[in-house]
Amino acid sequence: MRQGKLLKIINLIFPIIGVGLMIFYEVCDTSCSSLRGTFWGVDLKYVGIIFMTALLALNMPPVSRLVIPVGHLRTTMISGALGGEILLIRFQVIHDTYCPFCLAFGLCIMILFAANFLKMNKYIAVGAFLAGLGAFAIFFNGSVLPLY
């Protein structure tokens, strides 16, 4: 299979998996149900669904004609999300409460980043990564609710 075709498949499959994970997280009643988080006041589940849906839309044929701008937008989105995911994983480590759905979502982001890395503009990737770190450091609000 050609490398370009494999990348297209990855860019289609992992956003779909990410949306599915956030939908399942909505009905989660295990230990991860104690984790709560918002970004700019919006529940992280919805942020994840909107993010992955937008990333999925970048693969649609009319958008794919704009290869360079779409590539830069994909780089910005994935790199920024990776920066945010680092802080979200840090939050789970600090509170010693882990959510398999959240960690799997983060893995989707890491796979998307790794798969797209060679085609990324590295300056945009670094800037977006740092912006993602900064945005989540400022606008993320999380809590761990005790379950009795």
Image (cartoon, rainbow, N blue to C red):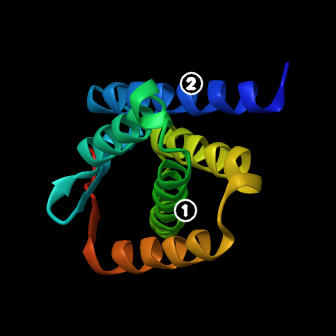
Residue at 31% of width from left, 40% of height from top?
Answer: 33
**Marks 2/1: CA–CA distance:** 18 Å
Q: In this image, 108 relative to 97: left or right?
A: right
Looking at the picture, tell me which residue is in the foreground, 47 or 31: 47
State the SS at label 1: helix
Quick one: which residue is furthest to the front in this view?
65
Residue 79, numbered circle:
1
Three-letter code, disc 2: Ile
Residue at 55% x, 39% y is 104
Residue 116 at x, y percent in the picture = 68, 48
Residue 61 placement (x, y as % from top left): 46, 25
Front position in the image: 1 or 16? 1
Amino acid marked by disc 1: Ser
Horizontal placement of 5 versus 16: left or right?
right
Q: Residues within 10 Å of mark 2 (few under 14, many from 20)?
A: some
Labels in figure, total: 2
Name the residue rendered at 45%, 67% in the picture.
Answer: 91
Residue 79 point in image, percent of width and height: 55, 62
Quadrant containing the N terminus is top right
Q: Is residue 125 visible?
A: yes
**Residue 134 in the image: above or below residue 93:** below
Q: Which mark is residue 13?
A: 2
Residue under the image location 55 percent in, 57 percent down: 75
Q: Which residue is more in the foreground, 147 or 65?
A: 65
Residue 28, can we see it? no
